[in-house]
Amino acid sequence: MEPGIGNICAVPRVLTWSRGLGISVQFPDLMAKRKEENFCSPENAKRPRQEELEDFDKDGDEDECTISFTNGTSTLTAAEVGIIESIQLRNFMCHSMLGPFKFGSNVNFVVGNNGSGKSAVLTALIVGLGGKAVATNRGSSLKGFVKAGQNSADISITLRNRGDDAFRANVYGDSIVVQQHISVDGSRSYKLKSEKGTVVSTKKEELIAILDHFNIQVDNPVSVLTQEMSKQFLQSKNEGDKYKFFMKATQLEQMKEDYSYIMETKERTKEQINQGEERLTELKRQCLEKEERFQNIAGLSTMKTNLEYLKHEMAWAVVNEIEKQLNAIRDNIKIGEERAAKLDRKMEEQQVRLSDAEKKYKDIQDKLEKISEETNARAPECMALKTDVIARTRAFNDAEVLYNRYLNEYKALKKDDEQLCKRIEELKKSTDQSLEPERLERQRRICWLKEKVQALQDQESSVNQEAAQFEQVIEKDKQEHVRIKREDLDVRHTLNYNQRQLKELKDSKTDRLKRFGPHVPALLEAIDDAYRRRQFTHKPIGPLGACIHLRDPELALAIESCLKGLLQAYCCHNHADERVLQSLMKKFYPPGTARPQIIVSEFRNEVYDVRLRAAYHPEFPTVLTALEIDNAVVANSLIDMRSIETVLLIKNNSVARAVMQSQKPPKNCREAFTADGDQVFAGRYYSSENTRPKFLSRDVDSEISDLETEIENKKTHIINLQHHLSALEKDIKRNEELLKRCQLHYKEIKMKIRKNISEIRELENIEEHQSVDIATLEDEAEENKIKMQMVEKNMEQQKENMETLKNLKIEAENKYDTIKLKINQLSELADPLKVQPGEGNKASFNDMRALSGGERSFSTVCFILSLWSIAESPFRCLDEFDVYMDMVNRRIAMDMILKMADSQRFRQFILLTPQSMSSLPSSKLIRILRMSDPERGQTTLPFRPVTQEEDDNTS
């Protein structure tokens, strides 16, 4: 055979995936490799299963020349395949023997105190089914799971294998036993046994095929969620991280990557076919050339005959071999295209389900937002109505007090009138009697007048106290008015500041330099122009804040609190340059306004060597290391002016206190700043007045949105304050009028007292022969009657006023009750739409780290339940799902999980919790496995079921 003519073979590469999609496909990547113009013999290479094959033993054959296609599993029904029947552990973690024990086919609660082995069961499940050690969040190496003092650990897991979807049922039977042996050196081996205990395989590919067939995904957080994975998800910073978690949990991300890989493989295969066809054409051409050469040779008939025969044999052998390879490649392409079409349909179905879920979520969010807007819109009306109810109630009470005062005055006047009439009658009857009866009558008159004076004095004291109460109320309202007025001025000042800051932020979107001042761009142009005209020795540098960049955006507020005005400062090479820059600044900064600081220091091209005097901490950076500074002059100026090499940046406030105050501060460290901008010294702590960065923030749109929301809140607050001020002013005016009436009444009482005392004195000094002036008493009685008529008229008017105010008060109360009932109805309507428990502002809902422990656990349960409805794994595990929850949220979470389990009886649920679960309803679908507390010297931690239900193997 001539050189350059060889065999062509396909080197298939098998792609395997099935994570969370109910699909198991192995697609060959047909590639042809040329080496020294000869083609290699066929070899198969499999694409390793990500995160699964790295920790397996290496006893499997990686170079089998076979192409494997595994059919996709059908929908699981009646928990026939893939669920966990039993688990047994030996020398695993800190347990000598754990199990054997059995799980039910639907809901299983594993309960027990800390240290009893609950988490060991979940860890063994992940490791025993091929998971990596790091996936358990319990260690970085398998050898860490071997009990101290032992040489190895063993895990035995029994999986159900029944029905039409059973995996190689004729070989394994109704159960598949996965046994894993972990050595102390970190290596592990597998034994896959049948129901009868026969070892079927020890290869890792067999276990992977079983997991793919059953859709078991121990590395998928939707199937098995550990406490650490839950914390990492809930403490993610933004919606993008949560969406990545969703893509990973539903395996859409891996499916997308695998689909792209299939399409690339398909294109490479087509290219190989084209290369093979071109090679076939070249071989045919070479065959014709050889044929022509042999025809020119004369006299060699025998050789020619043999040569002809060999040429035909060679050509047809090559053609036959190539055609075989091409047919195989075409068949593989056809199968691959069929698989790709199935994947396309599956992806479309998943996309439809995802779109439906997103649409439902958007509808709920829109409905909740609409309800919230309506509630917020009604809140000012509710507050105004409440204020109106209080004002009208106060007015009614004041009118009632005034009416009672008139009533008391009328009764006193009526009593006086009766006494005057009686006295006049007595005097008329005794006119002709002796002087002794007149003296006795004067004595009775004096006694009566004294009693009247005493009553008037008591009334005077009561009126005086009432006036003092009105004065106190007026003074209190005036103080409140001053306080509200001051608060209104403060809020307006803050509003003006926020509006200016908002304008600066909007301007900075087009020009970042405007964040350092509205005149900065024009000043920099003037500096450039002056430098071109050689007015500067060296061009000034600034503002310094525009010359630095953050390595960690979360430290923006801390660095601004540290550098403060230096962010707007400029650097000059010498004092001559400083004077030129000062003259330029005068054009843009009018007298009386603050100008940026100018630092005069000789420009150098190298940054100071501060290694000997810089602070160092293994966990926290200094301000110098946290900044990217391209200009050595800027770095040197900040070192000179602020010693940034000695200032640590510690995000957490409590950690900063611990580092700087609870122990000796790090060497050369003078102070530290937290992410909130707080300044921490060895013996002092200063809180920052700022809540957000002004110059170094990167997310300008988010800051603009936050400022706009804050401005709207301030405007609403000002309107409420104005309403409050108006109500206070009305109260003050009304109380001042009532006070004037009390003072006038007080003066009238004083005059009556003086008049009666004067009469008493006259009676005491009168001569016995002096006759009583009946006409005077009659005049007094007439005057008293006139006053009674006036008071009675005032009483009628006040009574009518009381009825009017009472009706207004009832009307205001009814309006307030109506709007309050509407708001409560809206709140009740919104409650079922809310996912997160607890209450708080918008920032609290967006930042999951702001939630309490119980709220974080409740949010985890809600999110996982939403993903369970689209996941295809046969079993789901949650580790201590109810940790930190209160009784109310624990009951709600439990009801949601049991409702989900009841609707998915073909799935298995394994829930780990330290609670007793004694309040659960009795059901054959619920099995509670309680683990005993570990005792000293104990070697076995048995499970015992709380209810003695029948074994699910009979179901």
Image (cartoon, grey):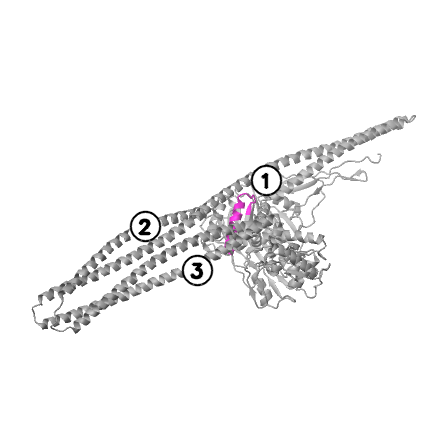
Please indicate, yes or no, whether residue 697 appears anywhere in the rendered image: no
Of 547 and 817, which appears nearest the observer? Answer: 547
Would residue 283 be counted in the magenta stretch? no
Q: Residue at x 68, y 34 (%)?
A: 333
Q: For the magenta stretch, what is the residue range?
A: 853-875
Q: Which mark is residue 675?
A: none
Please indicate, yes or no, whether residue 383 appears anywhere in the rendered image: yes
Disc 2 is placed on an element classified as helix
Residue position marked by numbered label 3 in the rendering = 483
Amino acid tagged 1 = Thr
Q: Earlier in the sequence, mark 3 or mark 1?
A: 1
Q: Residue furthest right?
A: 299
Mark-to-mark CA distance, 2 and 1: 74 Å
Location of residue 538 (image quadrant): bottom right
Amino acid tagged 2 = Leu
Q: Nearer the viewer, mark 2 or mark 3?
A: 3
Disc 1 is placed on an element classified as loop
Amino acid tagged 3 = Arg
Location of residue 428 (image quadrant): bottom left
- Circles 3, 1 touching at the beta carbon (< 8 Å): no
Residue position marked by numbered label 1 in the rendering = 73
Estimate how packed mark 1 is, as few (under 14), some (14 to 19) or many (20 or more) residues with alpha carbons within 10 Å.
some
Q: Main secondary structure of the magenta part?
A: helix
Q: Which mark is residue 808?
A: 2
- The location of residue 741, given as percent across then percent down, is 29, 60
Q: Earlier in the sequence, mark 2 or mark 1?
A: 1
Q: Residue at x 85, y 27 (%)?
A: 291
